[in-house]
Image (cartoon, coloured by chain):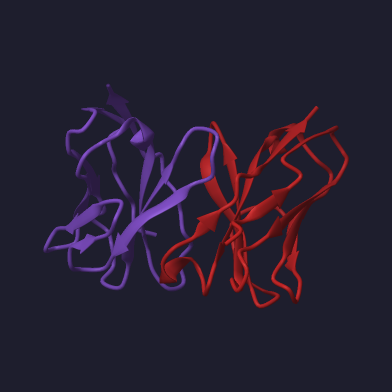
Amino acid sequence: DAKTTQPNSMESNEEEPVHLPCNHSTISGTDYIHWYRQLPSQGPEYVIHGLTSNVNNRMASLAIAEDRKSSTLILHRATLRDAAVYYCIPSGAGNMLTFGGGTRLMVKP
Amino acid sequence: KAGVTQTPRYLIKTRGQQVTLSCSPISGHRSVSWYQQTPGQGLQFLFEYFSETQRNKGNFPGRFSGRQFSNSRSEMNVSTLELGDSALYLCASSLAGWNTGELFFGEGSRLTVL
């Protein structure tokens, strides 16, 4: 399985953009990059996933480096509801979805 | 549409007992996977079922088992409970599997072993 490195925690101000980095230098060519988040006392929630190209959805954007060894989850305007633990998970066929420690995002009003 | 439903939400057992947890996936979803979450180990994959067959298995002892029924509902069983089995057990469903996109998680069953 590809190893990931994420900051333990990050802080953001409300209504400002947040860039959550993830290093996955051992990712294989067919591994997708998944992002999930877990709000307090809830199960994880899907955020976004991608393979090579940058991806956008209603929740966030995913910027994937050209060499695919890192990616950045972008929340365009953080709200208090975005305070959660964010998990970056590279995985592909034959591997399991393995959650690491994630990044705890704190949003200040 | 209804989300993933897990029952029971909370339960307390004693060492040596066994427990069965239930998961009802989103209608139409054929893949159900189970995770254990503890403060020390984080979220760990237990197993995945697809169309009643176990397709993937994590690194857990044989005391942990599961099954999936023809209606895609799934159960997991833990026998001979140990204190270390105290955890939040999460179930997730998807149309075809974790690597094809979005997993939908339930709120979990919190097991306390005394």
At horizontal 46% and vertical 72% (from top left) the residue drawn is A94
Give the vertical position of B73 relative to A85 (above or below).
below
At horizontal 25% and vertical 36% (from top left) the residue drawn is A78
Q: Quadrant of the N terminus of chain B?
A: bottom right
**Image location of residue A86, percent across then percent down:** 36, 42
Residue reaching furthest to the front: B1
Q: Name the quadrant containing residue A8.
A: top left
Q: Quadrant of the C terminus of chain B?
A: top right
Q: Name the quadrant containing residue B67.
A: bottom right
Residue reaching furthest to the left: A66
Which of the pair A91/A13 is nearer the observer?
A13
Q: Name the quadrant containing residue A48.
A: bottom left
Q: Is residue B62 visible?
A: no
**Image location of residue B17, percent across then percent down:** 88, 41
Give the vertical position of B51 relative to A81 (above or below).
below
At horizontal 26% and vertical 53% (from top left) the residue drawn is A24
Which of the pair B59/B53 is nearer the observer?
B53
Give the vertical position of A109 relative to A28 (above or below).
above
What shade does chain A have? purple
Q: Is residue A16 visible?
A: yes
At horizontal 19% and vertical 44% (from top left) the residue drawn is A76
Q: Is residue A21 left or right of residue B97?
A: left
Which of the pair B95/B61 is nearer the observer?
B95
Which of the pair A72/B47 is nearer the observer?
A72
**Image location of residue A21, percent across then percent down:** 22, 44
What shade does chain B have? red
